[in-house]
Image (spheres, rainbow, N blue to C red):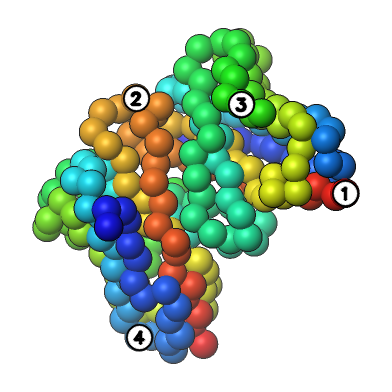
Amino acid sequence: GQSLEQPSEVTAVEGAIVQINCTYQTSGFYGLSWYQQHDGGAPTFLSYNALDGLEETGRFSSFLSRSDSYGYLLLQELQMKDSASYFCAVGHQAGTALIFGKGTTLSVSS
Amino acid sequence: DAGITQSPRYKITETGRQVTLMCHQTWSHSYMFWYRQDLGHGLRLIYYSAAADITDKGEVPDGYVVSRSKTENFPLTLESATRSQTSVYFCASRATGTALNQPQHFGDGTRLSIL
């Protein structure tokens, strides 16, 4: 089966940099994804890593180390609107579906 | 407008009742998914479907039934609702292909309360 571990809460101030870690255990690896959810709304896709290294998309970057079964989401130049829950996810059943971690609630203060 | 819609948005019912949550997508995506979200548990996969008439169990399928007679619809039925099924239910869809770099698109959720 699959399991994912991520911190439950992270706090930071505007303009800062924050890193949300995710460790995973999975019988077959099909990549690590990150999703964002505001206030219980529809989760939205942020990034996907299939290979080791850093993927950058604007202020957000995602990193993967397959040998360590570890990844992180890096948020730079934090803004109040980044306050949300962030979920890492891995593939289930040959990558057909996603299994999500329990999520990390990020609170950004001024 | 194209997208994925869930109905109803809110539902209150009683234990033992049958409840069906609807999910409709206009992208003709092959894959559709049902998740439930509870405090402390994140998003948990209930059932998913790779195409019409093909469904598979996820992490927490007990107490739920799904069907997929048409590509665009993926209803979720609680045959005899229990209080433990009080939750927020999200439907999602994804384009064809096993590569997970295809993002899952989520509906706005159905908030279900079982009294």
- Residue B103 seen by the camera: yes
Residue denoted by label 2: B99
Q: Is residue B39 left or right of residue B29?
A: right
* Disc 4 from disc 1: Cα separation: 47 Å
Q: Are marks 4 and 3 in contact (CB under 8 Å)?
A: no
* Disc 1 from disc 3: Cα separation: 21 Å
Residue type at the position of mark 3:
Gly
* Disc 1 from disc 2: Cα separation: 39 Å
Residue type at the position of mark 4:
Arg
* Disc 4 from disc 2: Cα separation: 39 Å
Name which quarter of the figure residue B31 lies in. Answer: top left
Residue B7, relative to residue A95: is it above or below? Answer: below
In front of the other: label 4 or label 1? Answer: 1
- Counting residues from the start of the chain, the first of labels 4 and 2 encountered is 4
Task: Tell me the chain of label 2.
Answer: B
Q: Is residue A75 left or right of residue B64?
A: right
* Disc 4 from disc 3: Cα separation: 48 Å
Residue type at the position of mark 1:
Ser
Q: Position of residue B27 (x, y in %)?
A: 23, 46
Residue denoted by label 3: A58
Residue denoted by label 4: B17
Task: Tell me if mark 4 has few (under 14), some (14-19) or many (20+) residues whose alpha carbon lies within 10 angstroms of its own.
Answer: few
